[in-house]
Amino acid sequence: MKSNRAQAGCSPARILLAEDDSDLRMLFALKLEDAGFEVTQACDGRELLERLIDSAPEGGNSTPFDIILSDINMPHFNPLDVIIGARSRLTTTPIVLMTSFADAQTREQARRLGVREVLDKPLRLDDLSATILRILADWRRQPAELH
């Protein structure tokens, strides 16, 4: 299933994956790489923020990542706080959050911040790749001025 951008002759879609559980992070990364994605990993909220800052063009309002996939509960910074702090750089980047226990209030806050989807753990690995592909396809169908 190596098809995310290769079909169009483009480079693979780039995912920023943030997960504090190293075993899960490696498992998710391997599955996504096997599906043809380029994956950059972050082990906590601080590293997620650093990766976003380090990857953004000077003064730009975009990120070189095509999608951000992050656990909600991580050390240092909660990804929702990272999204709030980096909002000017994340204006169009699709964001998907994962959680083992999110209440309705957290889900609503995520939606208000533009999070595309909140996935419940445990995740089926095949569903994860399919969800990422679906979100990227939906994002690419948007008018270019929204990117």
Image: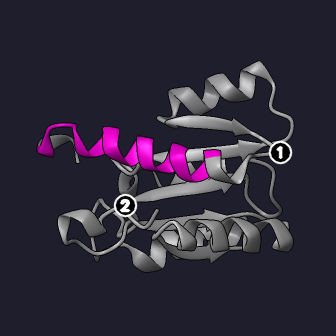
Of residue 34 and residue 63, the one placed in the foreground of this image is 34
Residue 25 spot, x, y in % from top left = 74, 69
Q: Quadrant of residue 104?
A: top right
- Number of labelled discs? 2
Residue tagged by mark 1? 122
Judged from the image, the secondary structure of the residue bearing numbered disc 2 is loop
Which residue lies at the image location 75% right of the left edge and 69% below the top edge? 27
Q: Is residue 63 left or right of residue 50?
A: left
Residue 70 spot, x, y in % from top left = 65, 55
Q: Is residue 17 left or right of residue 71?
A: left
Q: Is residue 84 visible?
A: no
Q: Which residues are magenta?
A: 127-144
Q: Amino acid at mark 1?
A: Pro
Residue tagged by mark 2? 4
Q: Which mark is residue 109?
A: none
Instruction: Say if 103 sits above or below 86 in the image.
Output: above
Q: Residue furthest front?
A: 1
Mark 1: few, some, or many residues within 10 Å (few <14, many ≥20)? Answer: few
Of residue 54 and residue 33, the one placed in the foreground of this image is 33
Query: Residue 136 magenta-drawn?
Result: yes
Instruction: Say if 127 sits above or below 114 in the image.
Output: below
Residue 52 spot, x, y in % from top left = 49, 69
Q: Is residue 116 visible?
A: yes
Which residue lies at the image location 28% right of the left edge and 75% below the top edge? 11
- Of pointers 2 and 1, the one earlier in the residue sequence: 2
Instruction: Say if 8 sits above or below 92 in the image.
Output: below
Query: Residue 133 magenta-drawn?
Result: yes
Q: Quadrant of residue 34?
A: bottom right
Instruction: Say if 137 sits above or below 30 in the image.
Output: above
Judged from the image, the secondary structure of the residue bearing numbered disc 1 is loop
Main structural element of the magenta stretch: helix, strand or loop? helix
**What distance separates the C-alpha of mark 2 from that of mark 1?**
24 Å
